Image: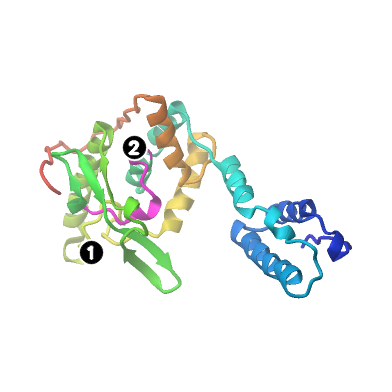
Amino acid sequence: MPVLGKVKLQALPPRAIKGFYAELRKKYSKDYVKNIHGVLKRALRLAYTESGLLAEDIMSKVSMRSKVNANEQKEMQFWTIEEFTQFLQSSKHHVHYIAFSLAVYTGMRRGEILGLRWKDIDFEKKELKVIQTANWTRDGLVIQRPKTNDSIRRVKLFQNIIDDLQERYLQIEAYRKEYSEAYEENDLVCCYPGGGYIKPKQITEGMDVLVRKAGVKKIRFHDQRHTHASFLLANSPLPHIRSNEPTYSKTPLLGKGV
């Protein structure tokens, strides 16, 4: 682990601490660096307020928040329309395709997508409701409401994603017939063929494989939200991806849910 070096406490400058954090970030996670910052902050403030070893609170000059946010900003990436089109065309028949389509067309988070149910979608109003998330912890699957009130929201649907959702529904109906009584009735849009909840790790690993196959720039699943936002800010028309293979005949799915 990087060290601050042999510097007398009274002569320790804020820039040395900032440099220490910069070295830590090269090898360790953001949360780990934040924990180190918390320990230093408490120790050096005690040295100032109680023991008198410091003449000033030097940690007041070390802004961890702004530094972390700057790093996160550097890591933010997104696809161009051409890259997104190429990725979706390449992954059209992948089991997780609908998750990727929802991510870019709606800007939803991964947990929100994996928790989305058919009853949360109103095809007549062309919108869906984000009211639950599906996440995995050490104790297993956790279904819960989004953490903030702002996250509980209605999302307008482009015709592109409506078409994909209708195709997905017909695919789900085929799975129900195939699995019969063994099918898990969770009402999920994104699920395994047997109806079970998809683990987030499977989505991430599947995306890495598909990115390489499509030959596009590697981004994180979360970065697809930035791709969605960039399209909206640029007022760009979102591409429509059509399959080259025969699909089910479509039946309009209108009303609340399907």
Residue 78 position, x and y percent, is 49, 36
Q: Is disc 1 surrounded by few (<14), some (14 to 19) or many (20+) residues within 10 Å?
A: some
Q: Which residues are magenta?
A: 104-117
Query: Who is closer to the viewer here, 49 or 113?
Result: 49
Give percent across and percent down for residue 68.
Answer: 61, 50
Q: Is residue 157 left or right of residue 258?
A: right
The residue under label 1 is which amino acid type? Glu
- Label 2 packing within 10 angstroms: few (<14), some (14-19), many (20+): many
Where is residue 14? Give x, y as percent: 76, 54
Q: Which mark is residue 184?
A: 1
Q: Which mark is residue 79?
A: none
List x then y, in percent, for residue 1: 77, 63
Nearest to N terminus: mark 2 or mark 1? 2
Q: How is the image coloured?
A: rainbow
Disc 2 target residue: 105
Is 111 contained in the magenta span? yes
Nearest-to-viewer mark from 2 and 1: 2
Q: Is residue 258 visible?
A: no
Q: Amino acid at mark 2?
A: Tyr
**Which element carries disc 1, helix, strand or loop?**
loop
| Vertical relation: 63 (above or below) 35 | above
Which of these two is toward me, 224 or 201? Answer: 224
Quadrant of residue 139 within the rendered picture:
bottom left
**What residue lies at 38% left-to-right and 62% top-to-bottom?**
135
